[in-house]
Image (spheres, rainbow, N blue to C red):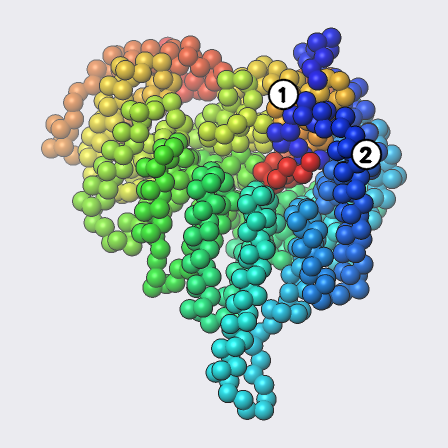
Amino acid sequence: MADSSVSNDILHVEKHVAYIRSLDTRRDSLEYWLTEHLRLSGVYWGLTALCLLGHPDALPRDDTIAFVKSCQHPCGGFGAHPGHDPHLLYTVSAIQILAIEDALDAIDQDAVVSWISGLQQEDGVFAGDEWGETDTRFLYGAMNCLSLLGRLDAINVPKAVEYVMRCQNHDGGFGMAPGAESHSGQIFTCVGALAIAGDLERLDKDLLGDWLCERQLPNGGLNGRPEKLEDVCYSWWVLSSMAMIGKLDWIDKDSLVKFILRCQDEEKGGIADRPGDMPDVFHTVFGVAGLSLLGYEGLEEVDPVYSHLSSLDFQIAESCNVA
Amino acid sequence: MASHGVTRSSYAAQSKDVAARERELKKLTEYHELTAEFQRKRTEKEYTKEALDVTAKVLKINPEFYTVWNYRREILLHTTLLPFSPSPDGVDETAAYGGYEASTAGLLKQELAFLFPLLSSYPKCYWIWNHRLWALHQATRLLSPPFAEKFWRAELDLVGLMLSRDMRNFHGWMYRRFVVANIEQPEKSLVEEEFAYTSGMVRGVGGMTNYSAWHQRSVLIPRLLEERGSGEQERMDFLEDELELLKRAMSTDPDDQSLWFYHRWLVYANALPGDRTAIAPDMPVVTRILLLVDQIEWLKELLESHSSCKYILKALVSYVGLYRTLKQEPIPDEDREDLDEVDENQEQALLKEWLDTLVRLDPMRRGRYMALRKSVLIQE
């Protein structure tokens, strides 16, 4: 409950660190097991938040690397957990964790590269796994991974870029496929892919920036699409996209900082989607990353393109509540 | 791990409830048993009806467990969803195929029926939508084209139902485009039907504010006009009707963003030459200018009754800037006389006034307005 003695004017760094460290101890809760299918991404979100909060060593490094390795399949891809099938979403998380821990040589990188490059389709987009679902999220994930591995040469980058441009809408935004409605999360993946490819000049930055800055609502929070509610995770996708096109000053940073801070659980740590809601590691990392991009004092700097933080799991944001 | 919209107070109340905690532990034990059974069967590559039942039980509790969906598809592909194979001993092949088709269709219907309640409970779960699409592709793969088409047609009704429950569900809209693409053939287009669907949406209750429907409309229009074989006059009439539809909506609710983004598309795509999404791409420059002036004049009128609506002001500033760009184009002398002279000083003063008001009304986006100011004001 709101505790009037603790104010949400500041970031409760120590509480958030304690909250993230406690996550793996909740094995007697149903929620812990119902979210096993995202565990590897969960580790990545937790680790990234800890890095930004200045506590990169708060999770045991060796255990983290061993867990990542245990999720890799002989084909090269990673599942979310041992016993879960390989998927690009979790492969991105795995590579990002290893990049943060400076442990990329702990795995067979060639196998990852060959598995990912095999997912590129004729039209340039990527499938998420052997079952063939395609999405600009996967395209971005593949490019992010391969650039972290220094192996963008293994795929057809110009074709991927052409596909991204086909997903652009008249409002300047991007959707999950050609013809799909603009959505902040997909905009992040498409702009991120163009940034990695060195093709940001193909964007109409004023048009896109205008759509993005209209995501800010009177309470300071950002929404993901027009006429939708604000949510902390969009402070990352909208903001990082604006940073990549140099339009961060088109929104009111102070009121966004205050909004994110209001979403903290001031007692137990963690950040929620909106003030008063249950926190989770996903909103915690996106809240902290947003604050970092806004220049909040005392946080490590986040890179808007790779960020050590870029997993595209806004799938989670749109997904069902798993609690 | 990602809890959207669960309040801390309701969670705290639930945690203190001893009976609820006991129920949770019981559920947890059941879930562990089920997932252990799933993992064992998968490792043993068991493709049976029993294994299929286990996947159903797990997925009803946790439809996000993507690996279980993969296993379910493997089981179906190994057991029931097999291609037709005529028996070698010369029995009536047509009759055999008829029997095969009916039973396969029955199986696919069962699969779709299993998915429907899940989709209703978890309308934003990617994996359920994916599996449903996969099941429909099995209809295309295994059944004769007319039979398969019945499945896709029925699906269009279902997605209509889902969208009527949540008009903005982007999974639903995406899925609708997939379904339509799978029904369409080179000689059979659904573009008229789909366009009519968006018309019904935007004209229905709450539809004006439906950004998703306006978006879909903007995607369909260029193809619609192409397929109708519309000439320039028809295209101009179409554009005018579309602007008229918006005018009515905007007069009712000028603070609705959806309308303004759509309006901006109509105005820009048809004002500037060479836009591939233009409705009337071949208008002479003077017509384009007059159309734009019409919109500007109308917005000025609208501003009189809604003086604190930032969207009107922002559109006015942008459109006047656009007007200035258009006037740089070569205009034939005989057309030039159709255009009114503009007093540049007066125009600049108006722009300045609108921009000042914008910053005052909407200080959050001050940086955005300063950039706009730089692009339209000649000097300060």
Quadrant in the picture for the C terminus of chain A:
top right
Determine crowd level at label 1: few under 14, some 14-19, many 20+ residues with C-alpha closer than 10 A: many
Q: Residue at x 81, y 34 (%)?
A: A26
Which of B69/B342 is in front? B69
Real-space CA distance between mark 2 and mark 1, rounded to the nearest whole angstrom = 23 Å
Measuring from the top left, give residue A210's x and y in whole percent: 45, 27
Q: Residue at x 29, y 32 (%)?
A: B246
Amino acid carrying label 1: it is Pro
Q: Is residue B189 left or right of residue B140?
A: left
Same chain under badges 2 and 1? The reply is yes
Which of A144/A50 is in front? A50
Measuring from the top left, give residue B19's x and y in whole percent: 77, 33
Q: Which of the 4 quarters of the picture holds residue A9? A: top right
Tell me the subunit letter for badge 2: A
Secondary structure beneath dot 2 equals loop
Secondary structure beneath dot 1 equals loop
Tell me the subunit letter for badge 1: A
Determine crowd level at label 2: few under 14, some 14-19, many 20+ residues with C-alpha closer than 10 A: few
Looking at marks 2 and 1 on the same chain, the residue that comes earlier in the sequence is marked by 2
Q: Which residue is mark 2?
A: A26
B8 is higher (above) or lower (below) than A47? above
Measuring from the top left, give residue A52's x and y in whole percent: 74, 26
Amino acid carrying label 2: it is Arg
Q: Is residue A120 left or right of residue A145?
A: left
A2 is higher (above) or lower (below) than B237? above
Q: Is residue A282 left or right of residue B331?
A: right
Which of A210/B373 is in front? A210
Q: Residue at x 79, y 19 (%)?
A: A14
Counting every numbered tag in the picture gives 2
Q: Which residue is mark 1?
A: A275
